[in-house]
Image (tube, rainbow, N blue to C red):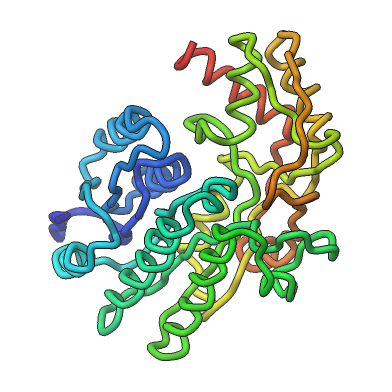
Amino acid sequence: MVDQTPTELIMNTILVTGVGGFIGSHVAEALLSRGDAVVGVDNMNDYYPVSFKRENLQLLSRHPRFAMVEGDICDRSLVRDIFDRGSISHVAHLAARAGVRPSIADPYIYEEANVQGTLNLLQATVGRSVQNFVVTSSSSVYGNSTAIPFREDDSATDRPISPYAATKKATEVMAFTYHKLYGLNVNVIRPFTVYGPRGRPDMAPWLFIQSAVRGGTIYKFGDGTTRRDYTFIGDFTTGFVNAIDRAHGYEIFNLGNSSTVSLNEALEIVRDVTGRELVIEQRPMQPGDVEITNADVSKARRLLDYNPSTSFRDGMGTFFEWYRQTRM
């Protein structure tokens, strides 16, 4: 899988699932840049254009310590083979079916990808020398919690309001079981609306930029007062890599910006950074949507040295420049 010789200064061999995706490709790039070997796995599904994922993989393939496995983590034999051949020291589990609204339409595919896929990875670590396993959950597990900002010990996570959030909560609980049974070190990461270059085209920041540039309609769900904790990819990646490096037994961490932006404010910022007038159509709130996401990141600051510093305005300016250069 990855050929390691005594002369190579490889820190670790890290399995990155969902490596062709937005966050997965950034995490893998950061690990490769500092000297780790990365074994990437991705089934390259068509949830959004596969060509975008191929572009991400092209960037990673420039590194001699990168090996790619195109396959599905729901395939137990494939997962076992990766661990048998790869000398995996750490797992960065980012592969998932994402999206609240699509999970309501087809919950079965979310259960298969998110729950069964995670179980296959956890089971494959049994009896092996995996030093740390980082599970990517979601801020969606907080639902409509009224305890603002969201803390990792919030009991509202026991009452998810979408199938997507339910599958993510299930992966957290299952990972805890493997920690207790086998002593596996696990850090659970709850991301808060991560955006930036190479972002997912189904997420609001991308859709806003794209519609502004093309003169298309932006659908504003609700009256625009809903608030989100937008996290720039550079800030998030630093926190995630620190979570790979630091084993704490079993811990859950919010990785957000820790400040919120209303939908109305976000649209104003999009107008400013693109220099385009926006065509906005208001629609009712959709099932599964939440009023606010807001991360308490004090635990991540303390244990992961996490320090998000990119404002939404600055981050969207950087995102727009990337979009203008690569997608227009």
Query: Is residue 284 rendered to the left or right of residue 34?
Result: right
Image quarter where the N terminus lies is bottom left
Please, is residue 161 above or below residue 191 in the view? below
- Of residues 89 and 271, the one nearer the viewer is 271
Query: Is residue 267 rendered to the left or right of residue 110?
Result: right
Quarter of the image where one finds residue 319: top right
Query: Is residue 301 rendered to the left or right of residue 144?
Result: left
Where does the image place residue 38, in percent across and percent down from the top left? 29, 52
* Residue at 42% across, 47% down: 24
Where does the image place residue 229, in percent across and percent down from the top left? 73, 46
Please, is residue 141 above or below residue 320 in the view? below
- Of residues 12 and 231, the one nearer the viewer is 231
Please, is residue 241 above or below residue 321 in the view? below
Query: Is residue 221 rendered to the left or right of residue 12?
Result: right
Quarter of the image where one finds residue 159: bottom right
- Residue found farthest to the bottom: 181
Quarter of the image where one finds residue 316: top right
